[in-house]
């Protein structure tokens, strides 16, 4: 029987995309977000065709085109000489090959586009200040519980409550966390603060010994996004909002190419953020009879393939299709999990492996390693070509 009311814990990119996919198919949906207001941090995010197909299906093409950058290429460069080691052509090639473009977006813009979509389909869909603590279920439904002691009944629960998910903790127990030894820096810089002609409209991964950084343009080329992943001995907080001294950032990139120095020198000194990158072994059991997981709650991943949110959005499209097509909720959640577990586990594993490639110490060895595996071809064959709107569910 078609479920009448679907509860979603978390209004991040994953929860919102799932809500939009479900509302579009005519389901009743309620999203519960712990924060007092909706929003995302001031950083960039990349979206490839495997996710953008879902966004286009939601009718978001014009909204994305208005704020995004469609990069010409994705370049892999050596940290000190700037030598180009590999290139993925993105401009028309990605869209031609995979049916949708590659986008670079500001997270706040992307989040707002999804919120607007959800609210246009159901203005009362999202509840704020609603911290989920757990749930109970029986054959007739699921009850979501909140920190203030209140509860909400529904037919299905999607736990889209992120990397520290309360729903995952209940379904699966604690997921052991392993500090990778790498942290991530992030900041953005407006174009007018950067030297003219610093860099084309491309994304670039600069690869160095035990360290890499990723730079790309946002907001139609008005803002540059920087993410840097150096090794650091001590564990730090797994939080997006910890400010750290600019001097430490600068020291992490001593000896890097003048392009990187120019970007670092343009950063606002008190607007540099750093957090720990942790590993978690992929889990294979996401679901109970009436509850399942989605996005980082199910498969947190290192960001080295730029796919965490893409996977969350794929999840939303597939779970919506499964709930529409299956004869019962438990069957739908089984179909969803079966369709998604292997793919997400592969993304998690390959993301970790890419760290190994980006961080090779010796220049010649790194060049050989890039030459030996054609990343552009590999990703085209298994990652970007996936279509969550048509992938078989059985
Ligand atoms: C450095 C870095 C770069 C990245 N770059 C990319 C990229 O380029 N492309 C890409 O696709 N992905 C990227 N990612 C991954 C991406 O950011 C995540 O995978 C994605 O944001 C996960 O979305 P989500 O909705 O599952 O979780 P979240 O974004 O964490 O959202 C969870 C939501 O649930 C809420 N919540 C949490 N607990 C509760 C509770 N108990 N009750 C109610 N609400 C709750 C939170 O407040 C939040 O709003 C990157 C990640 C990092 C760290």
Image (cartoon, rainbow, N blue to C red):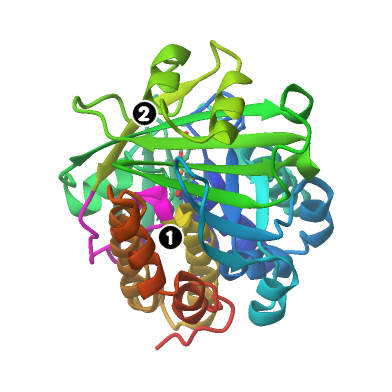
Is the residue 334 above or below the residue 351 in the image?
Answer: below
Res. 131 image quadrant: top left
Residue plotted at (39% across, 66% down): 370
Q: Answer whether residue 289 is magenta in the image.
A: yes
275 or 269: nearer the viewer: 269
- Say whether mark 2 is within 8 Å of ligand 1: yes
- At mark 1, the secondary structure is strand
345 or 2: nearer the viewer: 345
- At mark 2, the secondary structure is strand
Around disc 1, counting alpha carbons within 10 Å, would you say few (fewer than 14), some (14 to 19), or many (20 or more)? Answer: many
358 or 335: nearer the viewer: 358
Q: Position of residue 77 (x, y in %)?
A: 50, 51
- Marks 2 and 1: which is nearer the front? 2
Is the residue 219 above or below the residue 104 in the image?
Answer: above
Residue plotted at (48% across, 54% down): 306
Q: Quadrant of the C terminus?
A: bottom left
356 or 94: nearer the viewer: 356
Magenta segment's dominant SS is loop
Residue plotted at (24% across, 60% down): 282
Q: Position of residue 79 (x, y in %)?
A: 45, 42
Q: Which residue is mark 2?
A: 275
Q: Position of residue 300 (x, y in %)?
A: 34, 50
Tell me the distance, in whole angstroms, between the alpha carbons under discs 2 and 1.
34 Å
Stretch in magenta: 280-304
Q: Which residue is mark 1?
A: 156
Left or right, 197 with reference to 354? right
- Say whether mark 1 is within 8 Å of ligand 1: no
Mark drawn on residue 261: none
């Amino acid at each position: 029987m078609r479920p009448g009311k679907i509860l979603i814990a978390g209004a991040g990119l994953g929860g919102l995309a799932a809500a939009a996919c479900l509302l579009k198919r005519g389901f009743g949906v309620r999203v519960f977000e712990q924060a007092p207001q909706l929003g995302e941090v001031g950083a960039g995010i990349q979206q490839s065709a495997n996710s953008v197909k879902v966004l286009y299906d939601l009718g978001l093409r014009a909204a994305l085109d208005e704020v995004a950058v469609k990069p010409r290429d994705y370049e892999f460069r050596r940290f000190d000489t700037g030598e180009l080691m590999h290139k993925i052509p993105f401009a028309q090639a990605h869209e031609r090959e995979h049916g949708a473009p590659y986008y670079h977006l500001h997270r706040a813009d992307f989040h707002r586009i999804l919120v607007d979509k959800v609210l246009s389909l159901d203005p009362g869909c999202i509840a704020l200040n609603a911290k989920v603590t757990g749930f109970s279920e029986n054959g007739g439904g699921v009850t979501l519980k909140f920190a203030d002691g209140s509860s909400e009944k529904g037919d299905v629960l999607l736990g889209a409550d992120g990397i520290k998910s309360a729903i995952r903790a209940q379904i699966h127990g604690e997921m052991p966390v392993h500090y990778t030894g790498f942290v991530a820096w992030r900041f953005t810089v407006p174009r007018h603060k950067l030297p003219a002609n610093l860099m084309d409209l491309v994304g670039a991964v600069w690869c160095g010994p035990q360290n890499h950084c990723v730079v790309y343009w946002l907001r139609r080329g008005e803002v540059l996004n920087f993410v840097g992943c150096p090794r650091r001995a001590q564990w730090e907080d797994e939080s997006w909002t910890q400010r750290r001294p600019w001097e430490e950032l600068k020291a992490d990139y001593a000896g890097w190419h003048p392009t990187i120095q120019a970007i670092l020198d343009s950063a606002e000194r008190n607007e540099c953020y750093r957090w720990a990158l942790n590993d978690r072994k992929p889990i294979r059991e996401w679901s109970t009879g009436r509850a399942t997981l989605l996005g980082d709650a199910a498969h947190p991943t290192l960001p080295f393939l730029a796919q965490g949110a893409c996977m969350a959005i794929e999840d939303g499209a597939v779970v919506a299709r499964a709930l529409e097509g299956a004869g019962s909720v438990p069957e739908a959640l089984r179909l969803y999990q079966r369709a998604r577990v292997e793919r997400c586990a592969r993304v998690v594993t390959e993301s970790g492996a890419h760290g190994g490639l980006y961080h090779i110490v010796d220049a010649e060895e790194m060049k050989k390693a890039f030459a030996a595996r054609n990343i552009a071809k590999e990703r085209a064959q298994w990652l970007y070509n996936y279509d969550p709107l048509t992938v078989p569910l059985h």
